Image: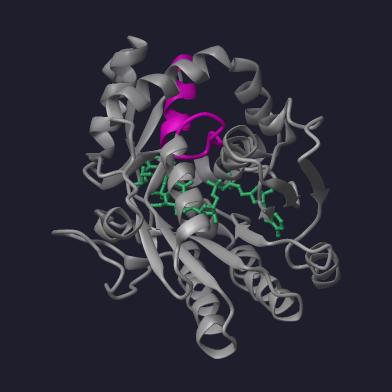
Amino acid sequence: MKILVTGGAGFIGSNFIRLLLQETSHQVVNLDFLTYAGNLENLQGLEKNKRYRFVKGDIRDRKLVERILAEPVDALINFAAESHVDRSILDPQSFIQTNYFGVAVLLEACRKTPVKIYLQVGTDEVYGPILKGLADEAGPLNPSSPYSASKAGADLLALSYHKTFGLPITVARMSNNYGPFQFPEKLIPLFITNAIADQPLPVYGDGQQVRDWIFVEDACAGLLAILEEGQPGEIYNLGGGNQRTNLEVTQFILNELKKPKRLIKFVADRPGHDRRYALDSGKLKKQLGFEPAADFENGLKRTVKWYLENRNWWRRVKSGKYLEYYRTQYQKRIGL
Ligand code: NAD
Ligand code: DAU
């Protein structure tokens, strides 16, 4: 199969492309705009692979997307997005543009040149805070941030193209990923890299918010199962089943790095901060037989080790445009 991966130079997309090239015989075209979060270093070593091609471009560029699909391709998996909730509070427009309008462009192009399967990569954040129990695929959508609202819109738009035009759409809704190559603006890589550098770890509010963590390699294996075997028109939750409070995660990182608790700094809470996410991934297990393999503590140990061994990668990333944003907007909001 020839697969168009959009947003493949980011965290999860680059892990997914590595999985495709290592574990399958599929061909891969990676279309990525290389925003601040896209980084070709994440794919280093794959450039010479004859089954891999990189195209720098924007999913909102209708002509470019149509040209790539006309080659033709068999499947499309869309990772491309603005993915950081805090940024969506500062600049909602760019999220609406890429996460919603960009998906509209991809879907229209698929009407012109059909693919066998289109997998929209979505998020558990569309269900909003789940204070008790687990959210299943039939649960109501209740997004809190411009990020999650733009992703909910994208899911609904994609599914409408299945109902109205018969496009072979599937949607995966994943919980919080962690692992190698995650941009150090997200909780786990930010706290690991800050702790290594003896910098404060800014915990929002009381730190009792709960996230359900999935190791990125498991998430990618789950996505591959959905891409290859998922049924058009269906939504599949893909969670790790590892619910932890932010303070538990923070304490684990400090222990692993043998750093003192005094690095924890409680700061202003995120506006619209969802208290708890928890996914019911029973449908994926029952229908496609998929379950994540990694246990959270092992996955987090592997992740800490990766950041210890790849300091040049994150030092470069942290000294780029990210730092500009971090110093000005983010630090101002949290009062650091
Ligand atoms: P990321 O921010 O690390 O990567 C996003 C990638 O998309 C980057 O390479 C960027 O250059 C690219 N991109 C952005 N705008 C683009 C555009 N207009 N055209 C082409 N490429 C563009 O994100 P991630 O954490 O890898 O997340 C990937 C996807 O998974 C996103 O859709 C996100 O909403 C979803 N998701 C992420 C998580 C998570 O925990 N990280 C969990 C659930 C769902
Ligand atoms: O749930 C899936 C989502 O997970 C994805 O759709 C998003 O793309 C991804 O960014 C992630 O969103 P979160 O907002 O849950 O991730 P983040 O790493 O930003 O924050 C995790 C938790 O940690 C959240 O409760 C906020 C808190 N936090 C985060 C940062 C960056 C802090 O306390 N301090 C921080 O500095």
Q: Which residue appears farthest toward the top when viewing the image?
A: 258
Q: Looking at the picture, tell me which residue is in the foreground, 111 or 43.
A: 111
Q: Is residue 190 magenta?
A: yes
Q: Quadrant of residue 9?
A: top right
Place residue 72 in its image quadrant: bottom right
Q: Is residue 144 visible?
A: no
Q: Residue furthest left?
A: 132
Query: In the rendering, at what x and y percent does residue 66 appear?
Result: 81, 70
Where is 269 relative to 188, above or below?
Answer: below
| Residue at (66% x, 51% y) in the render | 7
Q: Is residue 214 left or right of residue 71?
A: left
Counting from the top left corner in percent of width and height, residue 105 is at: 71, 74
Q: Is residue 86 left or right of residue 143?
A: right
Q: Nearer the viewer, residue 116 or 298?
A: 116
Residue at point 26% right, 24% down?
251
Q: Is there any visible trace of residue 300 in the rendered image?
A: yes
For residue 318, above or below residue 268: above
| 209 sits to left or right of 221 | left
Q: How many discs appear?
A: 0
In the rendered structure, which segment of residues is drawn in magenta? 179-198
Q: How is the image coloured?
A: one colour
Q: Position of residue 240 (x, y in %)?
A: 31, 44
Residue 149: say if magenta.
Answer: no
Image location (x, y in percent) of residue 30? 73, 48
- The C terminus: image quadrant: top left
Going 80% across and 45% down the picture, which residue do you hit? 54
